[in-house]
Image: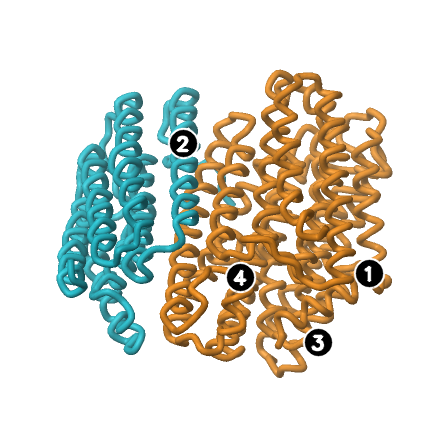
Chain colours: A orange, B cyan
Amino acid sequence: MATTLLWVLPLVPTATALLMLSSRDRRVLSALDVAGSSVLCALAVLLAIEVARHGPRAFGVLRIDDLGLVFLLLLVTLTLAVSVYTVGWLRQAVAVGNMKADALRSYFALVHAFVATMVVTVLADNLGVLWIAMEGTTITSAVLIGYHGHHHGLEAAWKYIIVTTIGISFGLFGTVLVFAAAASHGGPGTMNWSSIVPVASTLDPGIIRIGFIFVLIGYGTKAGLAPMHLWLPDAHSQAATPVSALLSGVLIKCAMLGIIRFQVIAAAACGAAFPAQVLLVFGLLSVVVATPFILAQHDLKRLLGYHSVEHVGIIALGLGFGGPIGTYGALLHVVNHGVTKALAFFAAGTAIARYGSRDMRVIRGLLHVAPVGGILLLLAALSLAGVPPFSIFVSELMILRAGIGQAHGLSVAIFLAMVVIIFAGLLHHVGAMTFGQPTAAAARDPEAVSPLLAMALLAAIMVLLGLTIPGGLDGLLRRATAIIVV
Amino acid sequence: MNPATAARVIDDLGALLLLSMIVIIAASQIARAIYAVAAQSLLIAIAGAVLAAATGNRDLWVIAGITLAIKAMLLPWVLHRVLRQMNVRREVEPVIPNTATLTITVIIVVMAFHLNASLGSVRQSITGNALPVGIALTLLGVLVMATRRKALTQMVGLFASENGIFFTAMSVTAGMPLIIEIGVILDVILAALVMTVMVLRVRSTVDADIADLDRLRG
């Protein structure tokens, strides 16, 4: 049954996307949206149970193992949350004219096509398919970023499509090199990751090293690692809120999964120290580069965009520190940051709609006009800043612990300094937005139910993962860590 | 065709590919750059055919055919149509002077060959000088994208970069699996279409080149 699920899974969002074209009614479209995402979520959970019982499954170019499962579960959870959020968000966006009522079906179709390409990147075993799906995510999401047709959105979309397409050209080049090394050194001659890994230690280290650097630059561009992050704040801030949540919460993690796949090959071929060193440099650079922009930011959504640069840097740092603790921490951070960032974008989107501005100097006294939304924004910001007892604190602590254990003193010091500065900066921004007297721009309508429902779901996961890691998830993360750290 | 002849022909094609790349970089008019990238794709198609004849790999014939039809004919034709529709008044606008770009070009080519020499044993498994040419083409395509302020020239750079990857894939491994190559080409077409729509959309709303917009800062 698991093999059937494997090829059905990408078809679910594809079918949902096609179904979207059959209606123009907002209610019908929203219902389809939630239904499609729920089915996807349910099937993914079934697949997770199968894999936990019987181990990894493969079907042609697709394969699911515990590593892929971590990302798949994050993807489907956030997709469902986005669908629920969209119901109420869309009603408001159509009412104020941010979304044109007659173009809704293509919007929904694109969102599900985007989800379908992301599902394929997570399930891809063939490294060529991984690349094709990754470029597919670029194309579908670029259209979504420029969707409202305003020239700011189009500018962001152009920057995004050009920069990431250049970037992942490098990724394809690296893939070709790795494939060449595998094919010419008595390897299996296929592009399947699962058949390259067993022979990876016999591959030529010289060519794998160049290949890995090309791949890291390539997929690193997509993941938003500095200095290839220049498109990210524009794209994540110009997209519609549900799309921002998917971009920031899931897409950059999918790119990290691509990097992890190649890290495993590179670690076997040229020793674990080489990929770790490279990841460490890019990770530190991302955290350092993001800091000043977070402090000086006035645009709420750009602020969250730069935060993604910081956190993807922290994930790279965790992988770079390595060892079981660092890697476990990095994978946990993937989940934690995905959930928290989606929640933050949701809460920010609701606040922006209420004040009609993305300027944080206009948004004041949110707790007065929208108590629930204000509390959720505050929770998300506290968690993003790394305050206990929220989930991000736990994974950051693990990554720090790994760094200290591996005696990376300088990196740990820089990392800590930046995290403290960002902590202060973020709390300053969000404190001013939530407390105090509301400005005249604030709308005083009651809060919509469905966005709050989606946010409550994510907030519950966020708090739960901060207090305890459930046994099932812990087992999954441990098995996934064992795939990376041999 | 015996392998030694094929390797020589591939080397010659590699030289011509580099030449076409330099023409793209030095071109002062967008139309010329488009012709040059079409010629470059034609050379890639010929290289595919030569390798197919030499290795007997049937997939390479298909790939050569697709490259000829799509990258040498269809995409340049689309670019030309857009060029005419946009009625471009200013021509290629480099961010840095052309002489500087050409100097960087020389440095990149030398570095690509140097990198190849340092790879030692790997070279044995690879046809002639295909790998350094492939690396150089990929990087030079990126250089074009980074140093031009016109959307169409950036697209030309993208296609040139993709050509470099295809050339490498063909000559290094005698081709990736056919289905993967087709998928990659499909992605390139889709990306080109989306970019075209964006370019025309911005042209019609704010009468500016999309690559020239710079309101998003900080």
Residue type pointed to by label 1: Gly
Q: Label 2: how many residues lie within 10 Å, few (<14), some (14-19) or many (20+)?
A: some
Counting residues from the start of the chain, the first of labels 1 and 4 encountered is 4
Determine which quarter of the picture holds residue A85.
Answer: top right
Q: Nearer the viewer, residue A205 or B103?
A: A205
Can I make out residue A354 in this image? no
Q: Which residue is mark 3?
A: A401
Label at residue B193:
2
Q: Nearer the viewer, residue A4 or A362?
A: A4
- Considering the numbered disc 2 on the image, is that residue within a helix, a strand or a loop? helix
* Circle nearer the viewer, 2 or 1: 2
Q: Which residue is mark 4?
A: A259
Residue type pointed to by label 3: Arg
Q: Which residue is mark 1?
A: A466
Label at residue B178:
none
| Residue depicted at x 75% and y 33% | A34
User: Percent x, y for residue B37?
Assistant: 23, 41
- Considering the numbered disc 1 on the image, is that residue within a helix, a strand or a loop? helix
Q: Nearer the viewer, residue A93 or A292?
A: A93
Residue type pointed to by label 4: Ile
**CA separation, marks 2 and 4?**
28 Å
